[in-house]
Image (cartoon, rainbow, N blue to C red):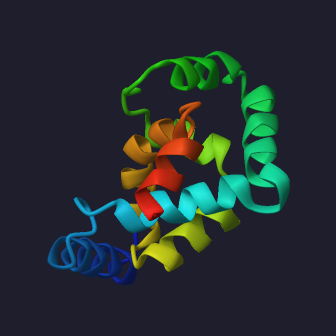
Amino acid sequence: MTASATEQLNSVFTKAADTLTAATTDTSGLFSALVQYLEHNGNSGEHELRQNAQIHGLNEQLAQWDQERRPDATTEDVVTKLLPVHVIEKLAEQSGLSREAAVRALTGVLPAACHKERSDQYTTQTR
């Protein structure tokens, strides 16, 4: 099944806007929004992420990210399994990215945010 002309045009405009706004390279706002989500209300976001990891068999992936100093990027598929659609959309909105750009950027940002020392790093960065 092929995408409609409107969907194709929307995709082209989204990619152009993401390029013009540096959405594919500036992830600092996305990282901050993600850490806020993970730590909000007594780490409820992190709890939800871990539940989704359990459901999708990704516990080992989270454990690896937690232990590595600089975890490698993941895939868009893993991002969309770990983070609910409404969270991805909210993160995109908060960081000024399209949903597609947010998912692409989250492939690198999510592993770093799941690292066990992220709370200390985030606190140090915001002081």
- Does residue 67 lie above or below 86 as drawn? above
- Does residue 73 lie above or below 110 as drawn? above
Nearer the observer, 86 or 31? 31
**Residue 26 location in percent, x, y?**
26, 63
**Residue 5 location in percent, x, y?**
33, 80
Residue drawn at x 46%, y 63% is 126
Residue drawn at x 58%, y 70% is 89
Residue drawn at x 46%, y 19% is 68
Give the quarter of the image for residue 4.
Answer: bottom left
Number of numbered labels in the structure image: 0
Nearer the observer, 109 or 9? 109
Nearer the observer, 9 or 43? 43
- Does residue 9 lie above or below 122 as drawn? below
Farthest front residue in view: 127
**Residue 60 location in percent, x, y?**
64, 15
- Does residue 28 lie above or below 17 as drawn? above
Nearer the observer, 117 or 62? 117
Residue drawn at x 54%, y 34% is 117
* Quadrant into which the N terminus falls: bottom left
**Residue 88 location in percent, x, y?**
58, 62
Is residue 56 visible to us here? yes
Is residue 84 visible to us here? no
